[in-house]
Amino acid sequence: MSDAIQYEKHGDIAILAANNPPVNALGKAVRDGLLEGIARAEQDGVKAVLIYGEGRTYFAGADIKEFGKTPLEPYLPDVCTRIESSPLIVVSAMHGTALGGGLEIALGSHYRIAVPSARMGLPEVLIGVMPGAGGTQRLPRLIGAEKSIEVITSGRQIGAKEALELGIIDRIAEGNPRQIGLAYARELIDQGAPRRAVSEMPGPEPIDFDAAYEATLQKGRGQISPATAVRGVQAAAELPFDEGMKRERELFTYLMNTDQRAGLIHAFFSERAVGKLPELEGVEPRPLSAIGVIGGGTMGAGIATAALLNGLSVTMLEMSPEAAEAAKGRISGNLSGALKRGKISQAEFEEMTEKALSLTTSYDDLGQVDLVIEAVFEEMSVKKEVFTKLDAVCKPGAVLATNTSYLNVDEIAAVTSRPEDVIGLHFFSPAHVMKLLEVVVADKTAPDVVATGFALGKQLKKISVRAGVCDGFIGNRILATYRTAADHMILDGATPFQIDEALEEFGFAMGPYAVSDLAGLDIGWAVRKSKRAEGLHPKARDVEFADRLCEQGHFGQKTGKGYYDYAAGPRSRVPNPDVPGLIEAERAAKGITPHEFTKEEIVRRYMAAMVNEAAKVVGEGIARRPLDVDMTLLFGYGFPRYHGGPLKWADLQGLPELLADIKRYAEEDDYFWQPAPLLEQLVAEGRTFDDLNKEAA
Ligand code: T1G
């Protein structure tokens, strides 16, 4: 008997207890144990079988670590069917998160009970597949096609109460799963309750599955697993159970072999691995309960909001009482959003705004905070003034953090007597919403200060990525490069609207020019002007059409017009008819003969620039691993999750072909297109970015 499932005979009830920490994933040993346990129970002359999970949860799904490898028998759908076909009464008692194959095991049981805190669901589409152990055939027999499609295509977790209302489970009871499961099995035996095989129930009433498929495909923005799952539910309505299971298996196997599944699994494991750095092993973070925030503008108020929402007290320092009150207004506005959405109660809202938050205009009030984050004007002299004051007033051991998005953290640290306590914590706006946090480690930053940065990120429920010091750290440095590639394509013949459309079909929620309109064209304008003032490289291609827009006062959404016209509202953008003329004038002035770009070429070039710069960022050690870049782009820049990130995408495309593209582009412009040494090395060695991730694990 596999020890992943512990067997126990308890009177006339056999107990199969899963013991496969951390989440009782349904690996081979668990599947073997379930089959052995059911067979043994049937020989033991018992009347019922109880299945539950020891530890933190009932089965949390198939073992994702087995994905992409040769499937090992017994296959999960066969285990579910074997459980269901038992002549004994089979009861599943759930707690924790009964997800995917876990819920499918429960659906293959005859009765289902859960503790009140239990959550369940079929999240397979979130990792690029779909329920593949009967979920698309059994769930609709319990709750109908329409509700099943919503549950399966959203992949959301359902609380026990809703599950009971929907008819997924039969009972909720207080206690631990073993207790409530045994009591329920006893009751069923005493009542002479029959076996109740879901597969023997009638299939769901048909709905307009083509309409559901199209709507789901549209919503998936290029991700195909949710829409494919709709066809699984359709089979439950149109085919006998066994045929439906075969159809589900076909669809599941098809999805299992897609790049999107590889991308989403990569994202799943990488978002957990990115915070695990060898250099932090065994390093204790410093205490974190009270923080100071300097500057209550959008960023500072967002950071303060995130801290308050996650149990920290905040001292907000502003230049004047009026500015401090205005900052409090922004914070309260942010928190009222959480209140409206039911994320916090009225009492919690008041506790945060009236007690946990304090305002000040005096640096002396920062003397006892554990960590200070400055979010003042992005000007080095201002940052240095702030850090000089912090150095004078903050207690020994306080962490001094800057939220700068590109200034040199080493230079800032150098004005203090404690550079080892200085770190960059680069939040993304809005800071209480965006998940990415770049933890920027300066030359002298102490390891426990880095650990404290990651601990803060964890407390704020961020995805924290370690970044080295360079212009733009990881994300903004790569962004600058692929944005420039887009501008060059416009000079050479593409339009902003074609580029946005191509990248939105690739999976971005918004193309780069729509994003620029959202962020404000004046930001890029200021950067271009400062770079021109510093002096551009003679071979650098300067781009001016956006300057013409800004000179006319068109900064994008905030002025109602930029690349697009927003007269009809931000969501109904219309291409600005003046833009093509500005571009044609620049081409003429530069003597450029434009040519057509296909959507494929636009995506290929845009991604080649992104991958090439990302390879430089990894090669220079600014990012520790390729997965760190992938997580940065996923959580800070809207990169489509089902591609896994730019470097996962590159691996899936094939690095040799990408390098060949870059070398071909370099024939036109060998300044912008300089192949990354790391990319050349990996191609020469026949390795991938994933190989580097594995080596760093
Ligand atoms: N397989 C393998 N490892 C898993 C796993 C899984 N299903 N789920 C979690 N882990 C690991 C995770 O990598 C981490 O490892 C540790 O467990 C703790 O996870 C046929 C085919 C269950 C809600 O999609 O949503 O069933 O980093 O940090 O925040 O239809 O994990 O410690 O080494 O996330 O408390 C369907 C995925 C699979 C559930 C717990 N199931 N997991 O969250 O802890 S497909 C899922 C989760 C399927 C069938 C199909 C969450 C969680 P390490 P954690 P957590």
Image (cartoon, rainbow, N blue to C red):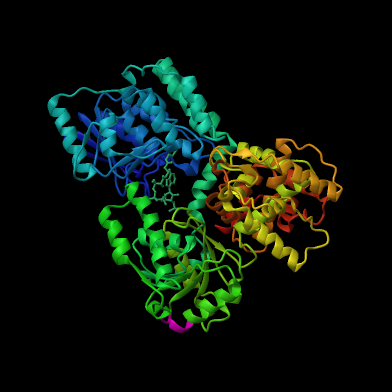
Ligand 1's quadrant is: top left
Q: Position of residue 99 (x, y in %)?
A: 37, 39
Give the image quarter of residue 202: top left
Depth check: give the residue in front, 573 or 140: 573
Q: Is residue 535 above or below residue 381?
A: above
Q: Residue furthest front?
A: 552
> Would residue 326 appear left or right of 673 to someone viewing this image?
left
Q: Position of residue 492 (x, y in %)?
A: 79, 44
Residue at image x 74%, y 67%?
Answer: 533
The magenta stretch spans residue 469: no
Q: Residue furthest right?
A: 591
Q: Position of residue 589 (x, y in %)?
A: 84, 50
* Viewport quadrant of the N terminus: top left
Q: Is residue 91 visible?
A: no
Residue at image x 72%, y 64%?
Answer: 531
Q: Is residue 482 above or below residue 378?
A: above
Residue at image x 54%, y 32%?
Answer: 224
Q: Which residues are magenta?
A: 391-396
> Would residue 241 appear left or right of 493 to someone viewing this image?
left
Q: Position of residue 384 (x, y in %)?
A: 56, 77
Q: Is residue 363 visible?
A: yes
Depth check: give the residue in front, 210 or 363: 363
Q: Is residue 211 above or below residue 519?
A: above
* Viewport quadrant of the C terminus: bottom right
Depth check: give the residue in front, 160 or 253: 160
Give the image quarter of residue 406: bottom right
